[in-house]
Amino acid sequence: MNESTPTDPNLEEQRREEEERCADWLVRHSDPAIVADESRETVIAQFESSVASFELTYPLEKLSSIAELSPGLLTLFLKDRDMTAGQLTSAIGELTPEEAEQYQLRTAAKKDLETIVEMLTSSGKREKLKEQYLRLSRAVGIINGGRVYHDR
């Protein structure tokens, strides 16, 4: 009789082949809805983690207090994307220390908020997540007519 032992190379090869067949079958027969739900749940968890991190990094009250903009700060907010690094540094240097802090805080928060918006879009825009996003978005505010509005 030719009995297989646990150290038999043929038995190990058979196990590997069986594992490969099982893995292949799972890939071909997986329910896309289940995979999508698991993927969406992962995105939601990442979204909620990003919101919590945002709130720890950026004081919402301080962001919400940025309202009236000086002409220099307004110009910087509106044109900073078109400036070179040197121009940006020079423009920030012309601001008061308080304005420079406001610029840096709001600019960094707005950039991080863009990442959160992308996650919101891929999460299926669940209402609870949208509410969390809107709270952060309102703290950053929207510039219009030389003023930052936090209620839109």
Image (cartoon, helix red, strand yellow):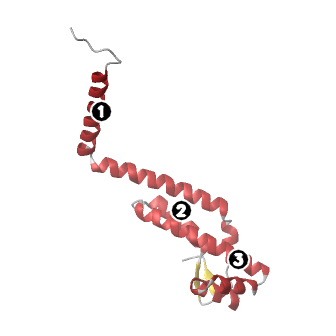
Residue at 64 percent across and 82 percent down: it is: 85
Query: Upstream in the sequence, badge 1 or badge 3?
Result: 1
Residue at 61 percent across and 58 percent down: it is: 53
Residue type for callout 1: Glu
Kindly identify which residue carries mark 1: 19
Nearer the observer, 68 or 118 = 118
Q: Are marks 1 and 2 in contact (CB under 8 Å)?
A: no
Query: Upstream in the sequence, badge 3 or badge 2?
Result: 3
Residue at 32 percent across and 25 percent down: it is: 12
Front disc: 3 or 2: 3
Question: How many numbered marks have been drawn onto this rendered protein structure?
Answer: 3
As drawn, the label of residue 132 is: 2
For disc 1, the neighbor class at 10 Å (few under 14, some 14 to 19, many from 20) is: few
Front disc: 1 or 3: 1
- Element at label 1: helix
Q: How far across and down, in percent of the image, does residue 129 sit?
A: 48, 60
